[in-house]
Image (cartoon, rainbow, N blue to C red):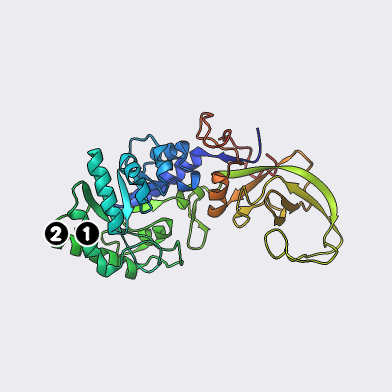
């Protein structure tokens, strides 16, 4: 098999989905599975559906278009006006934050003879997407006055931009707006989407769940972790995705460089620790393939640095040779980059290529250093 490649344990994705769906069901909260970190992988989407998600969400309409699935598809980023026609044909619903885009969606849906659902996002303090609290009523009126749009619900997003933690205080603001909207317009909103995987702990522990009935979960399903502190979620698999890279050089090299030093390829060079020599390896992986932050090397192996296409490692006591493959765990940012890189082999199951030649879905024994 070619390298670098992503290996996906689809059974682990399905397991994580089922555990989270079942836990949240006890609180009458349903799950929209988010596929954006996997480039809209149909195989991953299918695993989420087998695990019980009520729908799928992605921030790219191109990814949603690849998902021929029997559940609703939601665009979880405010649509680009230039893609309005594609959005209403592809997604059953979209998250929205402004009247200009809403008007474009209404025009596109009317021309296509379609009904499109809108979830209005409310700004609760993280300062990414969201309508100011005082402006929500006007945005609601715009949707209700449209020809071909339906107000499906209200939502919020926290922790992505400034790390604002979902809690009873900010969630209560969302719930008050929901109730005020329903009372003013004599309707019942189907969806109150309280956030992403960062909202999971709050949703499972709060005594003030309020009107929340949906979460949009990506990282917790895919990696088994919660984003606030990047800690594992009890009962979930944390190794559903593995990045495999091939070793292209192994040599004993000095621990410290020599000569006058300036900036390295990506800014300041790493701080050099230790003396003498070390057994150093280069893996054919670089920043074009994966984020260094979030790349988890095998136990006993230390990352020394990374440029565009070279990953330099201290092998420690491991006996590794040229041509061997090393297996790396992935954090969320590293997963997104690896799944997006055209140089990383991946597929959507059954040997069907995504953008690269194909992904394997088999795994060697747990704890194996070599692939």
Q: Are the residues tagged 1 and 2 within 8 Å (C-beta)?
A: yes
Callout 2: SS: helix
- If the image is split into quadrants, where does the C terminus sit? top right
Where is residue 163 drawn, in percent x and y? 46, 66
Where is residue 274 drawn, in percent x and y? 81, 64
142 horizontally vs 157: left or right: left
14 horizontally vs 101: left or right: right
Would you say residue 192 is visible in this rendering? no
- If the image is split into quadrants, where does the N terminus sit? top right
Q: Which residue is mark 1?
A: 140
Q: Quadrant of residue 64?
A: top left
Q: Which residue is mark 2?
A: 185
Would you say residue 159 is visible in this rendering? yes
Which residue sits at x=34%, y=62%?
A: 130
Judging depth in this view, the residue of 345 and 100 nearest the camera is 100
Callout 1: SS: helix
| C-alpha span from label 1 to label 2 | 9 Å
Which residue sits at x=79%, y=66%?
A: 261
Which residue sits at x=22%, y=38%?
A: 113
152 horizontally vs 349: left or right: left
Q: Residue furthest right?
A: 276
Q: Quadrant of residue 342?
A: top right
Mark 2 Cα within 10 Å, few/some/many (few <14, many 20+)? few
Where is residue 210 drawn, in percent x and y? 26, 62
Which residue sits at x=79%, y=45%?
A: 249
Judging depth in this view, the residue of 36 and 362 nearest the camera is 36
Q: Earlier in the sequence, mark 1 or mark 2?
A: 1
Q: Nearer the viewer, mark 1 or mark 2?
A: 1
Where is residue 216 drawn, in percent x and y? 38, 52
């Amino acid at each position: 098999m070619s390298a670098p490649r992503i290996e996906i344990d689809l059974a682990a994705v399905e397991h994580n989905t089922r555990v989270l769906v079942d836990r949240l069901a006890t609180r009458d909260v349903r799950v929209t599975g988010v596929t954006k970190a996997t480039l809209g992988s149909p195989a991953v989407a299918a695993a989420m559906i087998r695990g019980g998600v009520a729908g799928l969400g992605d921030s790219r309409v191109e990814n949603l278009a690849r998902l021929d699935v029997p559940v609703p598809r939601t665009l979880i980023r405010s649509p680009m006006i230039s893609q309005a026609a594609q959005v209403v044909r592809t997604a059953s619903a979209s998250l929205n934050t402004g009247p200009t885009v809403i008007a474009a969606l209404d025009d596109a849906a009317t021309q296509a003879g379609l009904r499109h659902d809108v979830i209005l996002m409310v700004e609760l303090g993280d300062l990414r997407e969201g309508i100011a609290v005082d402006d929500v009523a006007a945005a609601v009126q715009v949707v209700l006055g449209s020809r071909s749009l339906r107000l499906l619900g209200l939502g919020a997003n926290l922790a992505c931009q400034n790390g604002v933690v979902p809690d009873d205080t900010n969630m209560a603001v969302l719930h008050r707006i929901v109730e005020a909207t329903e009372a003013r317009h004599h309707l019942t909103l189907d969806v109150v989407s309280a956030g992403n995987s960062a909202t999971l702990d709050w949703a499972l522990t709060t005594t003030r769940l309020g009107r929340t009935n949906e979460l949009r979960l990506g990282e917790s399903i895919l990696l088994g972790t919660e984003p606030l502190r990047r800690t594992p979620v009890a009962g979930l698999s944390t190794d559903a995705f593995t990045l495999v890279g091939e070793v292209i050089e192994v040599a004993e090299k000095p621990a410290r460089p020599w000569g006058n030093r300036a900036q390295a390829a990506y800014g300041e060079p790493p701080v050099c620790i230790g003396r003498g020599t070390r057994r150093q390896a280069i893996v054919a992986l670089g920043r074009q393939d994966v984020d260094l932050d979030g790349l988890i090397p095998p136990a006993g192996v230390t990352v020394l640095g990374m440029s565009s296409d070279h990953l330099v490692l201290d092998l420690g006591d491991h006996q590794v040779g040229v041509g061997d493959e090393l297996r790396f765990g992935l954090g969320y940012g590293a997963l997104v980059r690896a799944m997006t890189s055209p140089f990383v082999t991946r597929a959507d199951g059954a040997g069907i290529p995504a953008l690269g030649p194909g992904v394997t879905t088999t795994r060697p024994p747990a704890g194996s250093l070599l692939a």
